[in-house]
Amino acid sequence: MITADDRAEILIDSLGYIQKFHNKIVVIKYGGNAMLNNELKASVIKDIVLLKYIGMNPVIVHGGGPEITQLMELKGIHTEFVNGLRVTTPETMKVAEMVLTGSISPEIASLFNANGVPSVSMSGKDGKTILAKQKDPALGLVGEVTQINTEYIFNLIEGGYLPVVSPIAYGESGSSLNINSDEVAKHLATALGADKLILITDVDGVLADPQDNKSLISRLTLTEIKDAIKSGVITGGMIPKMDCCTGAIEGGVTRCHIINGTVPHSIIIELFTKDGIGTMVTNEEDIYENGNR
Ligand SMILES: Nc1ncnc2c1ncn2[C@@H]1O[C@H](COP(=O)(O)OP(=O)(O)O)[C@@H](O)[C@H]1O
Ligand SMILES: CC(=O)N[C@@H](CCC(=O)OP(=O)(O)O)C(=O)O
């Protein structure tokens, strides 16, 4: 049984983390595979509400790949991925925008608003926040970020609002471009000077043996990532995530965390406990001792 003393001790133990994270920006990429169940979604939202109330400034970038695919199937439109990126025809773009900017963003913002955190949903087009160019004609309307304008997001943060950003960018003459949400998160985290980037997915983190859930690697440096990709330990969907973490850290973000959003309260466990729960990515010089997160 947890006594009142235990509770007090747990809160006091968190003080060091709370002081360290106060006023820091944390970009949280909330992947589509981790938002499939309403109960778990509520638990992720609660964790982020707590971060906001203890003085951090979370900025959410969300995905929604599975929901886009589902709606495309309902409409009888074929969907195809090349190297993890959705080939985006004008018709696909309409569906992606409808799902990401029209449905998922406002739904997440509503959950924050209902939980006492004023929140605004936006796409990368709003305030010309994310500018992009076409990545490769073979991929259609897939974008590559060329510039981030941080003013609108900083205005929202200063006004006390939590921004929820969909991964749709402002292309030539204001057209829409579809960007993978990991990539958007990396660019936003770097441009906003975020202290942390958290990638919420549906696996526990980076595993030394992808077939063995117990082989979680709790901490990885950029050199170890390179080696693990070279030796084939990290493959598939984890490679873009590692590229995203590497780019973010090279861009000045202190630490990246890959965590499982299907485990209740994984964000809080990762940030406020000595051992964390997922994989923390740091640069080589980062001194990690006494469980500082
Ligand atoms: N070493 C590894 N550890 C964990 N997952 C790995 C590893 N190597 C490859 N993967 C794959 O990466 C996937 C996670 O990426 P992905 O499915 O693209 O996530 P999301 O949809 O949340 O962006 C895992 O489901 C797993 O199949
Ligand atoms: C170009 C590209 O592939 N864009 C993604 C954007 C959504 C996304 O990234 O969603 P997840 O984070 O859930 O995968 C797509 O159309 O699926």
Image (spheres, rainbow, N blue to C red):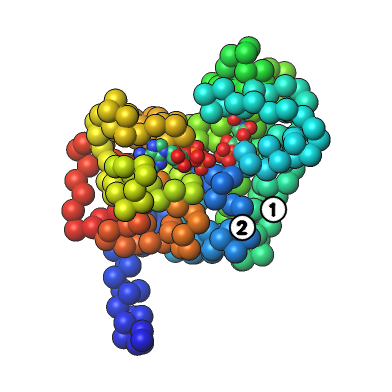
| Residues at marks 1 and 2, CA–CA distance in whole angstroms | 13 Å
In the image: residue 71, left or right of residue 49: right
Q: Looking at the image, which is closer to me, 78 or 120?
A: 78
Which numbered circle lies on residue 178? none
Q: Which part of the image, by quadrant, shows the N terminus?
A: bottom left
x then y, percent, for residue 248: 39, 34
Q: Residue at x 70, y 50 (%)?
A: 106
Q: Looking at the image, which is closer to me, 161 or 125?
A: 125
Q: Secondary structure at mark 2?
A: loop
Q: Secondary structure at mark 1?
A: helix
* Pointer 2 residue: 37
The residue sitting at the front extreme is 211
Q: Residue at x 50, y 56 (%)?
A: 262
x then y, percent, for residue 107: 69, 53
In the image: residue 110, left or right of residue 226: right
Report which quarter residue 117 is drawn in: bottom right
Mark 1 vs mark 2: which is more N-terminal?
2
Neighbourhood count class around disc 1 (C-alpha, 10 Å): few under 14, some 14–19, many 20 upward = some
Q: Residue at x 59, y 14 (%)?
A: 136
Kindly identify the amino acid type of the residue bearing the numbered disc 1. Answer: Glu
* Pointer 1 residue: 107
Task: Say whether residue 21 is visible.
Answer: yes
Q: Residue at x 35, y 62 (%)?
A: 272
Indicate the quadrant of ligand 2 in the picture: top right
Above or below, 191 against 10 in this view is: above
